[in-house]
Image: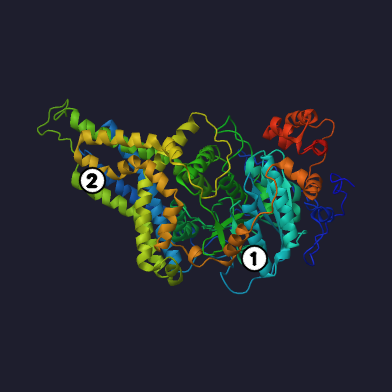
Amino acid sequence: MDPVTAASGNSPAYTGAETTGPDTTPPATTLARFPALPPEAPLRMEPQDLSAPPDLHGRDRHAETEPRLIALRRLAVIGSALALTGWGTYQMHLVLDASGTSVLGVIMQVLFVALFLWIALAFTSSIAGFFSMLTRGGLGLGITADGPLPPLRTRIALLMPTYNEDPHRVMAGLRAIHASLKETGQAAAFDLFILSDTTNPDVWIAEEAAFLDFRQETGDERHIFYRRRSKNTERKAGNIGEWVRRFGRAYPLMVTLDADSVMDGRTLVRIAAAMERNPEVGLIQTLPVIAGGTTLFARMQQFAGRVYGPLIAHGIAWWHGAASNYWGHNAVIRTAAFAEQAGLPHLPGRKPFGGHILSHDFVEAALMRRGGWAIHMVPALFGSYEESPPSLTDVAIRDRRWCQGNLQHYKVVPTKGLHWLSRLHMLMGIGSYVTSPLWLIFLLVGILISLQARFVRPEYFGDTKTLYPHWPQVDPVQAKFMFIATMGILLAPKLFAYIALLFDRTTLRACGGPFRTAISILAETLVGGLIAPIAMLIQTSGVISIFSGQDSGWNTQRRDDGRIPLSIIARGYWRFTVFGLILGACAWTVSLSLFLWMTPVLLGLVLAIPLAALTASRDAGLALRRAGLLLVPEETSPPDVLVKAAHALALPEPPRPQDALLALRADPILLASHCAMLPPPRKPGDPIDADCVVGLLKLQEARSLSDAEIHLTPKEKAAALTDVRAVERLLALPG
């Protein structure tokens, strides 16, 4: 039998029986016995009508798992933020000319209200988080952080969507999760799905090879599956939705992962058991902790996430209650609830605001809550990990896509029947990007007011006759007081997080002790403060480009810590330096005091190029680690599942050609398995794939394999590899 037909798909039905041990038979043979996918179990999932009331299917909108006195909690947090904003607005009014009004003064006052409300809500929420952490909250739903693991009665699917990611890196995380689950003794309850949306044909074939290696090494063909979509419509949301429609009925629960996700087996068992105990809960979100960073930027991110993150998460969980949010990964979801309520419609209009929803997670959580399902966060349950982008440049690329997705939500906010907190989640998501241009305008208006005071002759008496003149004024003492108060409110959450850490001696010791942790907080605050104006301009440019009609596309995220050449950094950041010099010149023209007042912003912008290079440096990050700074428990006392992931990542990859065509030619088992995993052949009347047709023609005309490599585009190559005829022609070509 030739390699193409060696695994033709005429295999026995998948039984779901437990494996008895590692299988030493070749992968192509085991693929015939245990197909790459289980039998389909379709579950209906229709797009929701955002203009119609939700179908509750007889459920009560009130969630039984809602904490007691939740209304008072929300009133305390939001009411206090509004009261604090009112106080700040009055104080800002005193700073400006209290005897009269001007257009610039009114604009500045309005901008101040919007920006101050943002930091005031973060401040009051952090107080709630501080209270929750001190009282050992953050779990609920019957979840315990330790003790015996509860038995599971449910089949759970672990979904790993991947898009042009390094297969070796993805499989390293999956190997760690799989090994950790086996140690719980309940691995049989979990099936692991690798859901590929990969478009790069070389990466696709490498994924298939890595999948076969994964199965062979673990001996677990019955619980590890692979599926690639030839058309990745609607991106990650479409990837998950397609799985639900094909296999969802067989799995009451599903856990969504990201390509960089690692989750401890015990954590997975505990949140799955909590879903079994609480049938009215639709989703439980864990707190992913950033780990594995080596560059200065990544280590700053993981330190901030580990030290400040729990405080923030405890705070929002305390007052969000059963109307919490979803971050798109490291969460367990009730599949039936997701299929029933979270089908995403296409938004009206053209891109970038119309079309499929990019930031799907917020919307999915909002629609599930609208349908009567409870959405909870459990920040006190650790064992959930992810990675940080290695540099400011990589964050900027990712943020551009997130910015477009969040701005799209303005079309979702009016949806009928949404919980008011779900609307607030989306408005805050929009605000997380809109505040950057607002901050920039606020700075520019402040300079204009100072220029006006310096160069425009004031009108002391105006049009009306008065006994006393109108003295335009900006009270410098009041301004200094307002600046100190604002910075205090902005930085207070970090102080609360440090105080809370002092009560957790184990974590404090793992972060380097009280002194080194305090120094680390100061260093992170200083460097983060310098980066802030750069990030402000990056996000502002993203907002402007979106409003000008530019779509973000879909780019693969860089996850390694490879250095970015200084020439590339200079080309990307010189504009910020020039803008900082111009801004500084304007401030200097007004007065020395204004220039000194704006020094933190100006310094960050002028030093944009060296700051971007320094924070992207692996050497700088590891130097601080050797000095005992920016330490987190995950690197001083790494959890077992992260040790497993690091060990799997360090294993050498099997020697295979990187090119897809060469890899298939060199490995008959991989070739046969690839053909067995292909979708059914095209039927008459099905849509014609132009790339596939052109790819087949080029392969027919090619005289050698190298000739085919030269003439096939990546799209044609990928499309052709989905057709058995193209693969047969590939075999016939001389090397």
Can residue 227 be spotted in the picture? Answer: yes
> Which numbered tag is attached to residue 180?
1
Residue occupying the far top of the picture: 463
Question: In screen coordinates, is 549 left or right of 56?
Answer: left
**Residue at image location 56% in from the left, 69% down from the top:** 145
Under mark 1, the amino acid is: Ser
- Residue 278 location, x and y as percent? 64, 63
For the residues labelled 2 and 1, say whether their Cβ atoms are less than 8 Å apart.
no
Give how far across and how far down residue 681 sits, in percent.
83, 38
Name the residue tied to disc 2.
Answer: 479
| Upstream in sequence: badge 2 or badge 1 | 1
Amino acid type, callout 2: Ala
In-image side of 533 versus 383 (left or right): left
In depth, the one of 658 and 262 nearer the eye is 658
Residue shown at 78% from the left, 59% from the top: 222
Q: How many marks?
A: 2
Seen at 62% across and 47% down, the residue is: 165
Q: Secondary structure at mark 2?
A: helix
Judged left or right of residue 703, residue 502 is left
